[in-house]
Image (spheres, rainbow, N blue to C red):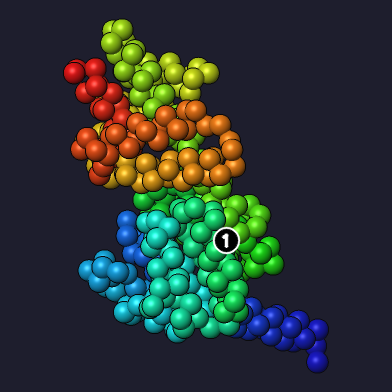
Amino acid sequence: TSFCSVAFQTFYSETVKASTRSMASKTPVGFIGLGNMGTPMAKNLLRNGYPVIATDVFPESCKELQDTGAQVVDSPADVAEKADRIITMLPSSPNVIEVYTGPNGILKKVKKGTLLIDSSTIDPAVSREMAVAAEKMGAVFMDAPVSGGVGAASMAKLTFMVGGVEEEYNAAQELLTCMGANVVYCGQVGTGQAAKICNNMLLAIGMIGTAETMNLGIRLGLDPKLLAKILNMSSGRCWSSDTYNPVPGVMEGVPSANNYQGGFGTTLMAKDLGLAQNTATNTKTPIPLGSLAHQIYRVMCSRGYANKDFSSVFQFLREEEGQ
């Protein structure tokens, strides 16, 4: 046999092995929770060649994904019957508890060895509870909350913060890289949630600070675009001032340019700040500005800002001064 044909045979068998491996890895992925974030995330799995088996508590939420080629089933238990890798993207801790441990929950029908990845933002203690419950059924639970919002979900540019058994991280990473640009291992179960909660607390404090600053500058006669430009070349610069400015007319393509529609809702920010407050109380950690941010966003929810983007705190502050 010539060297060339041996080399070709080796190349061919390696290629076949590699393609078999990639085919094997394209087994169905379950996806539960098809809201503003879940739908684009699941679409990116489909784009990457993964068959998706999905469900949502609101059947009408499934239509868009079904039209894109996903198989829709009736309950989380049905998903667990058909897939051994499942991603959940749900609004809050009670929803996660219901989807995993409820009468039609994942753990009713979960197969041994199933990988469960929860991308909801919830209390780290609930993540740890779910991990224990999953382990009893022979499954593996990891928390992988996201940062980046709806835009990043659509463009597969999310950041995933992952907590769980390190040996399972590669298996989770394979799926998460289809939906995000950054996947970071944080440590044991619950540490992904901890990182997310800390980030969002800082985000809220920064947004309120930016809104106050812009409002004061405008009241002092400064042009808002000019003030933003100065802040963004100075030590006060932050994400809320240079990427997501809360003042209408300063930036294109952000919620403030669209009457605060879309983006990251005030209700969700209030929820995340509530999680920060709970974890701070449990660990006896002082968070004076985090607590104040929590109260401001809670008041906003009761004043008609619940469904507006969290940058609407600028509008809220303008209203407060008018009273």
Q: Residue at x 38, y 42 (%)?
A: 269
Is 250 positioned to the left or the right of 125 in the image?
Answer: left
Residue 119, given in percent of the width and then of the height, sits at 47, 59
Q: Which amino acid does label 1 sit on?
A: Arg
Q: Number of labelled discs?
A: 1
Looking at this rendering, what residue extends furthest in the top direction? 220
Query: Which residue position holds label 1?
Result: 128
Graded by Cα atoms within 10 Å as few (under 14), some (14 to 19) or many (20 or more), the crowding at tag 1 reads many
Q: In this view, does 88 lie above or below 205?
A: below
Q: Nearer the viewer, residue 43 or 23?
A: 43
Q: In which quarter of the image is residue 129?
A: bottom right
Q: What element carries label 1?
A: helix
Q: Residue at x 38, y 78 (%)?
A: 104
Q: Residue at x 69, y 81 (%)?
A: 14
Q: Can the viewer see residue 41 in this picture? A: no
Q: Is residue 131 above or below residue 266?
A: below
- Quarter of the figure with the C terminus: top left
Q: Which of 254 and 120 is in front in this view?
A: 120
Q: Is residue 202 above or below residue 76?
A: above
Q: In this view, does 276 lie above or below 84?
A: above
Residue 90, given in percent of the width and then of the height, sits at 39, 60
Q: Can the viewer see residue 138 in this picture? A: yes
- Quarter of the figure with the N terminus: bottom right
Residue 49, given in percent of the width and then of the height, sits at 45, 73
Residue 128, given in percent of the width and then of the height, sits at 57, 61
